[in-house]
Image: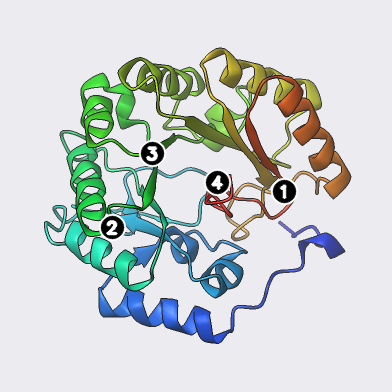
Amino acid sequence: MTYKKKPSWLRMPSRGSEEAAKVRSILRKYSLDTVCRQAMCPNLGHCFGRGTATFLILGNQCTRSCRYCAIERSEGVLAEPDINEPLRLAEAAAEMKLSYVIITSVTRDDLPDGGAGHFARTVEAVRKMIPVARIEVLTPDFRGSEEALKVIADAGPDVFNHNLETVERLFPDVRPEAYYRLSLEVLESYGRLSPSTPRKSGLMLGLGETKSEIRSSLEDLREKGVTMLTLGQYLQPSRSHWPVDRYVTPEEFDAWKDEALSMGFVSVASAPLVRSSFHADEQ
C-alpha cells in the first residue's frame, strides 16, 4: 500500500519552540500522556507551542482497534486506573496556566464503568485546583451505558464531546468494534442528563465518504442536539491503517462550515488540520 502524496496545505507545523519544550517538560514531570503524542496528531508542535495539550487518561493502550487510529491496542491485561493521575493532571494543568482543560482517554471496555469514574475524579480534581478553568471531556462510548454517562454529567464538565469520526456506511470497516447509532445515542442521552451542557462531535473527511453521507451525518448530529462540530482531514498513521481516499481542499472545508452553520450548529471548526481539540478554547 502506498501513501498519497500530501498537498501543500497539509504542511505540518514545527514541533520545536521554547513553549513546546516547556509543555513536554511539565508532562514528563507529572508522568502524564497526551492524545497529541499517542495519536500522532499533526498539530502537536503547534498546540504545545501555544502552551496547550489534550490530556490522555487511563493509560496509552486501547481495548479496541479502530483502523484509523495510531493508539496501540492492548494484547493483554491492562493496568488498573492510576488513582493519583487526576491530581497529577490537575497540578500539571495549573502549572501550564490553562484556562481550558481537555481530557480524553483510550477506550477501556475492561473496566466495569468504562473509566467513567476516573473521568469524573479528574474533572473534579481540575475544578478544585483551577476553579476558573473550563473543562471539556472527549469520551469513548461506554458501550452506551447511561449510568456511566450520568457519572460524567454529575462531575459537571463544561463541554461534552464524543466523536462520530466517520459516516454510517464506513463505520463497520473503520470502527468495527463501535456502532454509528450507538454513538448518536450517547450524544442524545447526555443531552437528557445535562441539558445545559453543550455537546460536541467531529468527523474525519477523506476516508471514502460521499458528500451526501457527510450531510446525512451532520443532520443526524443536529437531530440529537449537537451544537459544536469539528471537521478535519484524515491522515493515515501507517501503511497498516485505513488508506486516505482523498485530500479535501480548504475550500471544501470552508463550504462545509457554511453548510453546518446553516443547519444550526453554533460553533464549527472546519479545516484540513482541525482535530477535535484543536483551538477548542476558541470554540
Reading the image, the residue beneath label 3 is: 158
Of the residues tagged 3 and 1, which is closer to the observer?
A: 3
Task: Return the x and y of residue 208 as percentages of the image width and height.
Answer: 73, 36
Disc 3 or disc 4, which is closer to the eye? 3
Q: Residues within 10 Å of mark 2 (few under 14, many from 20)?
A: some
Q: Badge 4, how many Cα within 10 Å: few under 14, some, many 20+?
A: many
Going by the image, does 24 lie left or right of 2? left
Q: CA distance from mark 2 to mark 4?
A: 23 Å
Residue in the picture at 20% in, 47% down: 124
- Callout 1: few (<14), some (14-19), or many (20+) C-alpha neighbours within 10 Å? many
- Label 1, secondary structure: give it: loop
Mark number for residue 231?
A: none
- The residue depicted at 66 percent of the width and 78 percent of the height is 14
Q: Is residue 194 left or right of residue 210?
A: left
x, y percent for residue 2: 75, 59
Examine the rendered structure and indicate whether residue 272 appears above or below residue 238.
Answer: above
Q: Which residue is mark 1?
A: 244
- What amino acid is labelled 4 in the image? Ser
The residue under label 4 is 276
In primary-sequence order, the first of circles 3 and 4 is 3
Do labels 4 and 1 touch, CB within 8 Å? no
- Quarter of the picture holding the N terminus: bottom right
Distance between the Cα atoms at labels 2 and 3? 13 Å
